[in-house]
Image (tube, rainbow, N blue to C red):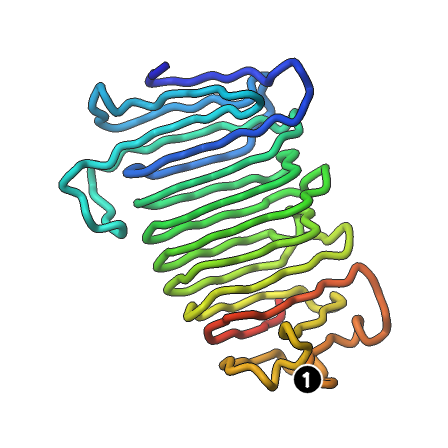
Amino acid sequence: MTADKIQISYPDDMLTNQLEIVTNGCELKIHPQDIAEWLIATTTGKVESNKKPRTETENHITRVIFENIHSQLTNMFRVAADTPVFKIDLSLNYKFDLVIDHFQDFMDVDLGHTQIRDLSASVKTAHAHMNFSDPNPVTMRRFNLEGLSSRLEVRGLANANFKELIFTGSAGSLMLYLDGKFQQDARIELRAKEAPTTVYIPRGLAVQVRSEDGNLDSEDIEFAVASDYTRKDGCYYTQAALDGQSPQLDILVTKQGPLEIDTI
């Protein structure tokens, strides 16, 4: 089904429900709203009739698809003045798994207070911004983030309430802000290849930074760490981690470009 405006109700079966948002050739904007529907999506700008958003349902997967790529378009980092905007209001009232697959043009996503149990985001665009402006009320078991962007910025990550975050890919620059409130121990694995990466971590949090073999000194990584970290056996720790405080944040570095750990 295709439409200029899409409204989807939350499935009644209460089993594992997964929402997939697949977009390309548009600006994607997602924001949380206190609405009865699962989501409401609207499109602004000129869209050809055969490329309007559509929905699909398969088992417990609901897909919202907006494919606006023109055949002559070859530059994934193109941002055109006439690019349509696909805006999604996402409900705060339901628990679900979320997949975002966005290719080409700007992305601005806020998932604050949405009840996401698993999150997978694949972002291939010039500039992408994600935010968790308020805490996730449920535990996010895993957050898989794949990026191929000139600039990828994720803020409020502590509010995502994840147990595990894995980043893969490459970006012109990757910035991860772990502001917000950690509710449990968490693990981050960085596989950023050549991408310069900066991780901003709140002062006072218990943090360990290590490589796969436990010794960052053995890795060929351009690495800088804030002055309040202590080096011990090839790993780096905050004083809170050395004191055994919780929650604990474990950062595993593999296949990594230049990395900076800074304090906010």
Q: Which image quadrant for residue 179? A: bottom right
- Residue nearest the observer in this picture, 12 or 207: 12
Look at the picture and state if 52 lies above or below 246: above
Q: Which image quadrant for residue 16? A: top right
Q: Amino acid at mark 1?
A: Gly
User: Residue 205, percent across and down?
Assistant: 74, 65
User: Residue 95, percent across and down?
Assistant: 66, 29
Look at the picture and state if 28 lies above or below 39: below
Q: Residue at x 54, y 47 (%)?
A: 131
- Residue nearest the observer in this picture, 32 or 120: 120
Residue farthest to the left, as pictured: 72
Taking 125 as reference, is 56 left or right? right
Q: Residue at x 47, y 52 (%)?
A: 146
Look at the picture and state if 207 lies above or below 55: below
Q: Residues within 10 Å of mark 1 (few under 14, many from 20)?
A: some
- Residue nearest the observer in this picture, 198 or 63: 63
Q: Residue at x 50, y 17 (%)?
A: 8
What is the number of callouts on the image?
Answer: 1
Tell me the residue that label 1 is attached to: 234
Q: In which quadrant of the rendered image does the C terminus lie? A: bottom right
Circle 1: element type: loop
User: Residue 165, percent across and down?
Assistant: 61, 54
